[in-house]
Amino acid sequence: MDALADSLADPSRPSFLFGVTPPREGTSAGKCREICSKFVARQRVLATDGFIVYDIQDESSRTDDPRPFAFRRLLDPSWYAGLFQAESGKQCLVYKCTPNTESEEHFLSWLEEANKMHRHRAFTLVGAASSDLAFKGPTVEESAALLRRYGEEQKRQLRFGCVTIAERHMQKHREHENMLRKIGWGAEWFVSQGIYDPEAMIELINDYAALCRSRGIVPKKVLLTFVPCGRKKTLQFMKWLGMKIPTHAEERIFRAAEDPQTSPVEMSCQLNRENLERILEGTYGCGVPLGLNVESVSGYRDEIDATHHLFRDLQCILLDHRGSPWMVRWYDVPASIDKVGRTRALSIVEKDRDDTRQSLTEIKAVIAAQSAVSAEASKNLRMSGEGNVAALLTGIGIGASLATIFLVGGLAAGLMLRNRNYA
């Protein structure tokens, strides 16, 4: 069962994802795994379907404005996403900027490795940052055809989606047509850019819904992306990425610095909550299924911390808006998932990263130490009957068709009916 892809393609239920970027190139495999483990440990208390792992490209060709944060090449998103699956038991939606590959053959080689070695089945295909430059790799349309052909030849069900940009719709009023064209290529979902202008997204979703009705097409799901912002440099970067930040929103965020009862990042989260409510009201009844994605575009601690609180708040708003009872549960993730995942992650490193043999030794030492701890914990478990708690959504191992969401996390145990008070 492909729980994440099933969730993303299922119009009857929302999907909830959390975005993450890979570490910089040159980061040791051991350090990558440490970063991933810490991230997943904190994520266990969030009822996510899985993670988005981004493929970051240098977008300087898209604009003449200076980049607020220097561009640094990052590790392959497919490889890093494999660590997340091993640590969390949850699947990842892997981004790939296909024109940045060296050729069609190079893209197919990457795809085969992502699928066979890292076991990914869900992808988001992203185009070039600018159409003014020539690229060696395939376009999104070409890579979509290559992905479908590879899946058919290998008898593997690979699925993909694309991005959608409301700001582009406000300029050219053709983004809804782009979405239908991508559906024709096989796209099964769309992920938006970060939203601070709800009116642009409302117009796009309603135009998309109307066009689908006129063509007799069932709309594919749109995941709405929200990003906290607590600093002017972060806001400049968001603008540089193409996000539209209305003047009134910018002023409201930074006026909060003068209020001892709040802060700019908290005010940005309040704006995100209001924007989601406005989008849900403005698109009510249009027939387009929605989901959520929350991410941080900076490395600042307060902005990263804010993403966790924002995710839970937005999830409550979206689920409450559906008008039917919902609940959150925890349950134990079988220890075998973690054991198998760790073994697979280790084999991936051995096969895929010959240049990190020293780091590999470090990973093996960490795994050996953790195995000893796990053995002792298992002994204590048999004696005491206590176990670790982890978090998974209904889609993992149980079937994405259920509307129930399973929250697997830390030592939190609870069952809530339409309850907004998280532990």
Image (cartoon, rainbow, N blue to C red):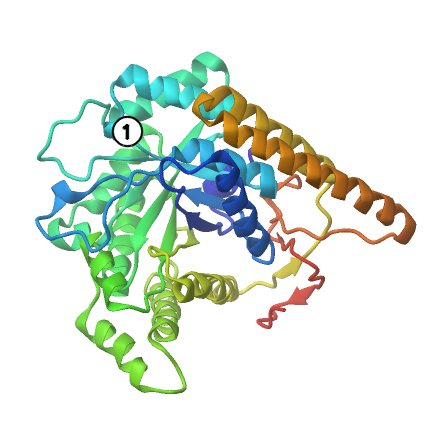
User: In x, y percent, where is residue 349?
Assistant: 52, 26
Q: Mark 1: few, some, or many residues within 10 Å (few <14, many ≥20)?
A: many
Report which quarter residue 180 is drawn in. top left
Say which of 349 and 83 sits in front.
349
The residue type indicated by label 1 comes to Thr
Which residue is at the far right?
A: 383
Say which of 346 and 236 sits in front.
346
Question: Can residue 233 be seen in this snapshot?
Answer: yes
Residue at (44, 12) in percent of width and height: 153
The residue that disc 1 covers is: 98
Quadrant including the C terminus: bottom right
User: In x, y percent, where is residue 384?
Assistant: 89, 53
Q: Is residue 204 above or below residue 54?
A: below
Q: How many dots with numbers?
A: 1
Indicate left or right for 215 with 406 as reference.
left
Q: Is residue 73 above or below residue 384?
A: above
Indicate left or right for 359 with 71 as reference.
right
User: In x, y percent, where is residue 114?
Assistant: 45, 26
The secondary element bearing badge 1 is classed as: helix
Residue at (50, 16) in percent of width and height: 155
User: In x, y percent, where is residue 371?
Assistant: 73, 37
Quadrant including the N terminus: top right
Say which of 72 and 110 sits in front.
72
Say which of 154 and 347 sits in front.
347
Residue at (37, 54) in percent of width and height: 224
Question: Can residue 118 be seen in this snapshot?
Answer: no
Which residue is at the far top?
A: 153
Report which quarter residue 90 is drawn in. top right
Indicate left or right for 3 with 246 as reference.
right
